[in-house]
């Protein structure tokens, strides 16, 4: 069992993806209202060696020795990976040991204003930054950044990174109805995307409850309206969660373990992490599928969202 590696997990975009988690929960440069990992407990732009390089390299070496190669190695997990000052060194280690495995970095993109961060990511194959707002008011409402981080600084970092990075940039935009889906906001977002020039734009929405109770995911019709308003090439709506089951890394035993656990008693995400010994990002992937299939339901209580088995679900597959 690894502490800082998780998966491989069934990724909609990256196939069989081995996750690398470089920061503790929940160290991040944003406190987004939709985050399925939970509320940010350390909101910061300060870079540190939150998880030691030696520990990460030790786990990666062990994994490579004892497991088949994944489709991707992905930096993601409990918070913002670029906050770890050794991310560039870990990328270099992987490239030296397993140069044929592509590296992806899932980032909110907020630290790309820092030339050092941009340099450290230069050897990655794919960088997947997020961008949810085109105006300062919406940025603060959805992403809730530190006071010192302005939207202008954030956007300039994305624009500069595109000038320097020769790999792929897949820009993800998460649509929240009544937050960032107005025509005015989307048209401003279109102008910014044209300046960033990503290789693709991926429209996403909320699969399950975030940190706030007043938000909900967009419908297919609402997402198609966003596409029509953006009118950009290489823009797509990310595939629905159930399609993860077609990925070879999808583990039926993991799905069964989650269902059997919450059938005994409702659990929060953190409860499931403690009981099953799985990484929260990995459990999140399976909860996305189970929720979209109607097999689980989330109930808001004082300690957060509790997941329980949906007794009204009828499995007709058998």
Image: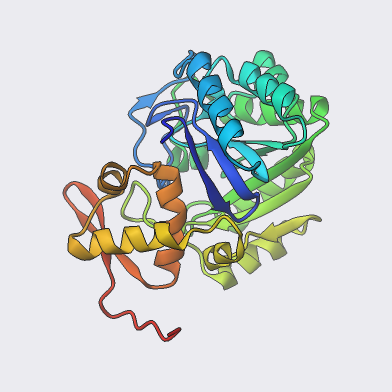
In front of the other: 151 or 103: 103
Image side of residue 129 versus residue 9, left or right: right
Position of residue 55 relative to residue 243, above or below, is: above
- On screen, 187 above or below 243? above
Q: Is residue 47 visible?
A: no
The image quadrant where one finds the N terminus is top left
Quarter-wise, where is residue 244 in the image?
A: bottom right
The residue lying at 61 percent from left, 28 percent from top is: 154
Could you tell me which residue is drawn at 31 percent across and 64 percent down? Answer: 259
Horizontal side of residue 301 vs 103, given as left or right: left
Q: Nearer the viewer, residue 20 or 107?
A: 20
Question: Quadrant of the image for the C terminus?
Answer: bottom left
User: In the visual, does 143 lie left or right of 234?
Assistant: left
Give the colour scheme of this rendering: rainbow
Residue drawn at (52%, 21%) of the image? 58
Residue 55 percent location from the top left of the image: 48, 19
In the rendered image, residue 312, in percent from the top left (x then y), is placed at 28, 80
- Does the rendering let one see residue 103? yes
Query: Residue sitting at 48 percent across and 52 percent down?
Result: 179
Front-lying residue, 108 or 65: 65
Count of marks, rendered view? 0
Point out residue 265 in the picture as x, y percentages from the top left corner. 17, 60
Give the percent coordinates (x, y) of residue 140.
46, 36
């Amino acid at each position: 069992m690894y502490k800082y590696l998780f998966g491989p997990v069934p990724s909609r975009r990256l196939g069989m993806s081995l996750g690398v988690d470089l920061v503790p929960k929940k160290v991040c440069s944003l406190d987004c209202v939709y985050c399925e990992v939970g509320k940010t407990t350390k909101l910061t732009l300060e870079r540190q060696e939150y998880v030691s390089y030696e520990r990460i390299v030790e786990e990666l070496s062990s994994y490579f020795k004892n497991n088949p190669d994944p489709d991707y190695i992905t930096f993601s997990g409990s918070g913002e990976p670029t906050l770890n000052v050794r991310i560039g060194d870990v990328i270099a280690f992987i490239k030296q040991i397993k140069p044929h495995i592509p590296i992806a970095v899932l980032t909110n993109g907020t630290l790309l204003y820092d030339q050092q961060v941009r340099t450290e990511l230069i050897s990655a194959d794919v960088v997947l930054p997020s961008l949810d707002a085109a105006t300062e008011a919406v940025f603060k409402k959805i992403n809730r950044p530190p006071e010192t981080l302005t939207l202008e600084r954030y956007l300039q970092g994305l624009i500069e990174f595109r000038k320097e990075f020769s790999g792929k940039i897949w820009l993800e935009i998460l649509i929240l109805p009544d937050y960032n889906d107005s025509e005015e906001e989307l048209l401003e977002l279109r102008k910014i995307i044209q300046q960033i020039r990503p290789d693709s734009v991926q429209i996403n929405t909320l699969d399950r409850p975030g940190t706030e109770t007043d938000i909900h995911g967009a419908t297919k019709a609402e997402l198609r309206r966003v596409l029509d308003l953006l009118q950009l090439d290489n823009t797509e709506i990310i595939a629905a969660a159930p399609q993860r089951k077609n990925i070879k890394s999808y583990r039926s035993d993991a799905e069964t373990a989650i269902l059997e656990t919450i059938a005994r008693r409702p659990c929060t995400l953190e409860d499931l992490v403690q009981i099953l010994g799985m990484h929260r990002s990995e459990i999140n992937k399976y909860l996305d599928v189970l929720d979209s299939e109607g097999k689980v339901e989330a109930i808001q209580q004082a300690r957060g969202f509790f997941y329980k088995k949906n007794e009204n679900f009828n499995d007709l597959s058998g």
